[in-house]
Amino acid sequence: MAKRPARQFACRACGAVYPKWMGQCEACGEWNTLEEIAVEPLAASSPRASSKGRRVKLEGLEGMAAPPPRIQTSIAELDRVLGGGLVPASVVLVGGDPGIGKSTLLLQAACKLAAKSERVLYISGEEAVDQIRLRALRLGVGQATLDLAASINVADIVATLEAEPDVRVVVIDSIQTMWLETVESAPGSVSQVRACAFELIRLAKRKGFSLILVGHVTKEGALAGPRVLEHMVDAVMYFEGDRGHQFRILRAAKNRFGATDEIGVFAMTDRGLEEVSNPSALFLAERRGNIAGSAVFAGLEGTRPVLLEVQALLAPKSGDNAPRRAVVGWDSGRLSMLLAVLETRCGVKLSGMDVYLNVAGGLKVAEPAADLAVAAALISAATGMPTSAGEVYFGEVGLSGEVRQVSQADARLKEAAKLGFDKAVLPRRIARGSARTKPPEGLTLREIGHVADLVTADMEAD
Ligand code: TYD
Ligand code: MG
């Protein structure tokens, strides 16, 4: 039998476990994130394990009762990301940088739920009850019949929840402040965070309430990040955004009860988070027409079309240094590829230039469909000719410069028409006459087969 390790170490950033201490975590590459954790109990098969296992009941696939209805929070953007609302007896982890708005969002959601006469408990380990009351007043939800508590002691919280009847939703803000007496390490350590989450999750499953755990993402410092809990919970959501920008995005990273590619968009205002049901209008609000180096990308976030402005800036590189390639909101490897394609296949000279690329508003784009918009922005920056203000772009660009099909063209076109755009540049249909529904009213389509077509169009327009 393999000898049980005497000590174990876990990474605070990603939760990977090692038998010895190392300076760098091999799994996530972070430095100085390993800490000693309590060694896990013996495996059940071990001869030293004391109690013998009982037989479990085996069942067939059929015979399930109808699932209990979801608990809708009445915040549509949140419900969308959850996959239609909270599932009873499930656990959702909401992660995000400190100060991004997790407590605000969950307090608002808790109050909305309470207003629908659901029994909701909001337990904070970070703020006193009066502070939460003040925040609720500021958010204009001070009248809700919410049950508040300030506690960090999980044993107390469990005892309270055991005794309270009809609890439907429990918010724990945050899991890193929670503490179990039986675990010998400080709050926020991997062992504490895991043990506290385990206790609370077990209770949620047994009592049938929905549990929402808040977890701060910590780049450095001594706190265990939400990733050490990802495998223990049913859904993981990250609340993202740039503190300098008003809007926030809630993104599902894992969801046992729904799709993971949905996003919820919010704007942080002086009265809390407001839902943004039309994100394109928000992202394009500050766009100035008639500036070279800008192009509008008709993108998709999950199932939702979103229009975004891509900005490119070129400047002559200084001295003998290698040219700079700085990218915000897009993949830098993809930018290098596109620059090479433009240079080699379209004769656009960019190698002597520093290139800066930015997706305005702070959103991160992962779709290859953005290639064409990025190419248009780069060509526009290189030629000094603005793209037309009423134009949107989408399409993937291949290494030979060919423009490839992307999914959901119709949804993208519809969104563009809705926001008043009048022209879309998109990939050419593969087979002539293949199915494409009529473009929406007021939108003309320009189908191109090669990125070089963008360059010639600019010449023609000249
Ligand atoms: P908070 O929800 O406390 O963040 P987290 O729980 O993720 O740490 O949000 C704090 C920030 O939000 C704070 O910097 C101020 C801002 N804020 C507003 O702009 N408007 C508001 O109505 C509220 C409540 C907070
Ligand atoms: Mg908070």
Image (spheres, grey):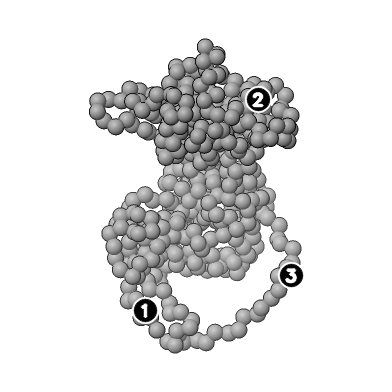
Q: Nearer the viewer, residue 335 or 203?
A: 335
Secondary structure under badge 1?
Answer: loop
Check whether the beta carbons of the residues at disc 3 and disc 1 lie within 8 A of each other: no
- Find residue 269 and report its horizontal and vertical position in percent: 52, 34
- Residue 260 x %, y %: 58, 50
Horizontally, residue 404 falls left or right of residue 312, namely right
Secondary structure, mark 3, is loop
> Judging from the image, what secondary structure is the residue with disc 2 in?
strand
Q: Quadrant of the N terminus?
A: bottom left
In this view, the residue farthest toward the left is 320
Q: Position of residue 174 (x, y in %)?
A: 46, 55
Task: Please name the residue shown 49% across and 53% down the image.
Answer: 214
Please state which of residues 413 and 285 is positioned toward the viewer in this rendering. Answer: 413
Mark 3 / mark 2, whichever is N-terminal: 3
Q: Is residue 123 left or right of residue 31?
A: right
Are the two marked residues, 3 and 2, in contact with CB atoms closer than 8 angstroms? no
Q: Which residue does the numbered mark 1 point to in the structure image?
A: 4
Q: Amino acid at mark 2?
A: Leu
User: How crowded is the residue under tag 2: few (<14 C-alpha within 10 Å), some, or many (20+)?
Assistant: some
* Residue hosting label 3: 62
Task: Choose the circle earlier in sequence order: 3 or 1.
Answer: 1
Q: Is residue 267 above or below residue 121?
A: above
Residue drawn 55% across the image and 36% down it? 396
For badge 3, the amino acid type reads Glu
In the picture of the structure, the residue carrying the numbered disc 2 is 445
Vertical side of 410 occupied by 77: above or below: below
Amino acid type shown at disc 1: Arg
